[in-house]
């Protein structure tokens, strides 16, 4: 049985978040959470909470063995980009792009 969870419009760069997500793809859920616990990146904490949410969704669906779950798919899509301007010298302005991410995860109990 599969369960999924999504996290949308997170104020993290998709490029930086993909580096964290690639480390847990295909791992057993407990191993993935242990890996994320010791990563220094800010996105690791959010991905960890997302995995815990997907596990809770699996429990709600009635999965008997939660420890047998593994990360079937996990991916990061780019969200909307917040555009800001920074005043510069001589009346000019520089663009500041603040990207957002959409993170999706699917857990499964059979490989």
Image (cartoon, rainbow, N blue to C red):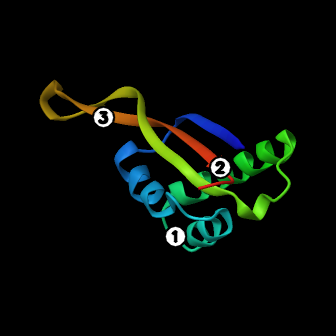
Residue toward you, 29 or 52: 29
Q: Secondary structure at mark 2?
A: strand
Task: Report the quarter where the N terminus lies.
Answer: top right
Residue 110 pos. (x, y %): 65, 54
Q: Which residue is mark 3?
A: 96
- Which is more foreground, mark 1 or mark 3? 1
In the figure, is residue 100 to the left or right of 6? left
Q: Are marks 1 and 3 in contact (CB under 8 Å)?
A: no
Q: Are marks 2 and 1 in contact (CB under 8 Å)?
A: no
Residue at horizontal 78%, vertical 42%?
A: 57
Who is closer to the viewer here, 33 or 39?
A: 33
Q: Position of residue 20 (x, y in %)?
A: 45, 59
Residues tagged 3 and 2 counted as in contact (Cβ below 8 A): no
Look at the picture and state if 76 lies above or below 84.
Answer: below
Query: What is the quadrant of residue 48 in the picture?
Result: bottom right
Q: Which label sits on residue 39? A: 1
| Residue 30, percent from left and from top | 68, 68
């Amino acid at each position: 049985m599969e369960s999924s969870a999504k996290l949308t419009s997170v104020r993290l760069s998709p490029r930086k978040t993909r580096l964290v997500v690639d480390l847990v793809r295909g791992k057993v859920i407990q191993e993935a959470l242990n890996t994320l616990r010791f990563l220094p990146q800010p996105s690791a904490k959010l991905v960890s909470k997302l995995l815990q949410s997907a596990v809770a969704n699996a429990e709600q669906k009635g999965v008997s063995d939660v420890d047998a779950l593994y990360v079937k798919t996990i991916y990061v899509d780019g969200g909307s980009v917040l555009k800001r301007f920074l005043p510069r010298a001589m009346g000019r302005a520089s663009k500041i792009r603040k990207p957002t991410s959409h993170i999706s995860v699917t857990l499964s109990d059979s490989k």
